[in-house]
Image (spheres, rainbow, N blue to C red):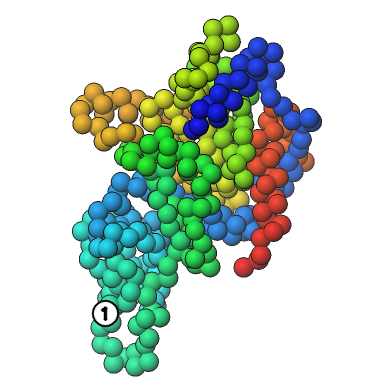
Amino acid sequence: MTPTNAQDLLRRALAVLERHEPEMADAPSTIPVADYLDAERFERERTLLRRWPQPVAAADVLRAPGSHVSTDRLGVPLLVVRGDDGVLRAFVNVCRHRGARIVPPGTGQGSDRFACPYHAWTYGLDGRLRGVPQQVGFPSLDREAAGLRPLAVTERAGAVWVVPDTRCAAIDAGALLAPLADELDTMGFGTHAGFDPRTIERRCNWKLLADGSFEAYHFKVAHRATIAQMFADNVQIVDELGPHRRLFLVKASLDPTRPPAAEHFQPRQHGNLIYFFFPNTFFLVQVDHAQLSSVEPLAPETTRVHELTLIPDPPATDKALGHWQRNVALYRATLAEDHALAESIQAGLASGANSALTFGRFEFAAVRFHAQLDAALRSDVPG
Ligand code: FES
Ligand SMILES: [Fe+2]
């Protein structure tokens, strides 16, 4: 983050604390309940999300030639590989013969080729079709055209990101992330190590999990058992960068009567930063590490959450391991509070109590997210 940006965050945070009123939109707003329930809309959202970079792994697990990650995002089996030439590539993890999954889910090292478990068609690390047993059965097979389907991939902010739509294979995924990833890379996350990744499933619409990450209004109540005491009440400084945004959630330690020197102000020392990568990934920057959380819609009322912690170095001692485990435990306890509330909202959505959900003037970032999502859905070309 530039000193100018940091000083702007400090100035605005102090102004909010001094006047005891958060930055706000001109008016409250509402989001239709149907937006969280509608199956047709849900399919259009999934199609849209497939066109945006999805974080699939910590970058450090894919550093060595021959390393690979096999996973799934948004209904697409993915294979990410570091080639012998050092190039990172991503493919649809589906055989070009009769469509079996080639590499089972998980990570691996030292591969030099991938053989399909069905009839052993074999692919190189570059995705090219290398071997076809009994090729007499496929007299007109064009090997060049029968390689694995490529996908756009990039390495930014300590993670590997894949765009799971084959029609987007030629786009620059890094450019889509640039405004936020550039800032995160200046904080050194590009060389961080992944720690304790986890995937969980929640019974709620993916946007309810997003809504809960766009305001600190709920901290004092929903997080009273975990992080509430650490934060100023309802202070969120929000900046949009294209469809993405950065939130500065100010800690109670920032005292407006004894403000820190502006020229040395480090936002991470006085609050959490949430970098929201449109449309479904949150990168939470804390004092000495970061936590990445990506919400993957599975069904209108079911969401998979992929979590990854990024730390400066792999823990070398039990003390370091304990430190990071405690950090992850607090993160998960806090998110569990958010997730339980999102599930409770989902359970009542169809009750008829509300035809729309109400968002106060200081909950504007969630409202903006829905507006940007709506705009993206309108401009989306049905595939
Ligand atoms: S489906 Fe892969 S080799 Fe037949
Ligand atoms: Fe929360």
Q: Residue at x 38, y 36 (%)?
A: 188
Q: Is residue 303 at least partly visible in the picture?
A: no
Residue 173 at what x, y percent from top left? 49, 56
The relative height of residue 153 versus residue 279 in the rendered view (above or below) is below
Relative side of 306 to 43, left or right = left
- Residue closest to the far top: 257
Residue 336: x and y in percent read: 48, 32
Task: Tell me where residue 15 sits by quadrant.
Answer: top right
Work out whether residue 11 can be spotted. Answer: yes
**Mark 1 secondary-structure assignment:** strand
Q: In terms of image quadrants, where is residue 142?
A: bottom left
Residue 156 pos. (x, y %): 42, 47
Label 1 C-beta lies within 8 Å of the nearest ligand 1 atom: no
Front residue of 326/27: it is: 27
Say how many tags the image has: 1
Whole-percent x, y for residue 11 in the image: 61, 20
Q: Nearer the viewer, residue 174 or 336?
A: 174
> Which amino acid, by three-letter code, is at mark 1?
Gly
Pick the quarter of the image with the C terminus: bottom right
Could you tell me which residue is drawn at 34 percent across and 70 percent down?
A: 127
Please tell me in which quadrant of the rendered image residue 205 appears.
top right
**Label 1 Cα crowd, 10 Å radius (few <14 / some 14-19 / many 20+):** some
Q: Is residue 232 left or right of residue 306?
A: right
Left or right of 350 on screen, residue 116: left
| Residue pictured at 42% horizontal, 37% vertical | 186
Outermost residue to the right: 27
Instruction: Identify the residue under disc 1.
Output: 131
Q: Which residue is at a point 66% across and 54% down the rendered structure image?
A: 376
